[in-house]
Image (cartoon, rainbow, N blue to C red):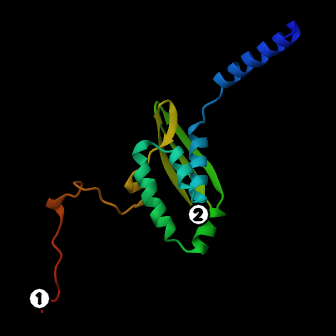
Amino acid sequence: MSYYRRIVYMVCVSGAIIFSSCKKRPEPQEVALEFMHAIQESNFERAKEYATKESQQVILLYSIFDGKRNENEREKIKNAQLEVVDHKEEGDKATVTILNSSASQQETLQLVKESGQWKISLTLESILPTYVAPGTMDMNNMTPATDSSATK
């Protein structure tokens, strides 16, 4: 190898090392949008890449619900415009609020750092708003249901 070629080779190799080590990690809002786009496309394997390990089961459950949607609902979701309207970072936690045009509402996603990367943190409550986690019901403040047929 000529002297000139060796110089070019060394510059190229060291340049590749510099560029790969300087690669910018995605910001929370970028992760949130990528996650939402994967959900829009019903690409749950890709969505899992943007989520914490604990969120994997929630994505699986969501995919089951998604499979029960009719074609019109699925098209509406797929064609929705997504826009980040707010984001906040506090240490290893972040929230990203996205305006979803198909639902005409804002969705707030929770993110945490996992192995130095921002990941979506999902809970059952985040996909099932009426879900009550076991052990969170206050049995002392519940009133018994009345059976109207028993009073007749």
Is 5 in front, or is 70?
A: 5
Residue for point 88% across, 9% down: 4
Packing grade of label 2 (10 A; few <14, some 14-19, many >=20) is few
Is residue 84 rendered to the left or right of residue 44?
right
Identify which residue is drawn at 49% across, 45% down.
51
- Residue 52: x and y, percent? 45, 42
Is 92 placed left or right of 35 in the picture?
left
Please tell me the numbered disc located at residue 89.
none
Residue at the (86%, 13%) spot, across then down: 5
Please indicate whether residue 79 sits to the left or right of residue 118 in the image: right
Q: Which residue is farthest left?
A: 151
The image position of residue 85, as x and y in percent, is 60, 48
Above or below: residue 73 compared with residue 52 = below
Residue at mark 1 to residue at mark 2: CA–CA distance: 46 Å
Disc number at residue 104? Answer: 2
| Cβ atoms under marks 1 and 2 closer than 8 Å | no
SS at circle 1: loop
Q: Amino acid at mark 2?
A: Ser
Where is residue 64, by image quadrant?
bottom left
Q: Looking at the image, which residue sits at the far bottom?
A: 152
The answer to whether residue 97 is above or below residue 2 is below
Query: Residue 151 got which mark?
Result: 1
Q: Quadrant of residue 148?
A: bottom left
User: Residue at point 50% right, 50% down?
Assistant: 108
Q: Nearer the viewer, residue 47 or 93?
A: 47
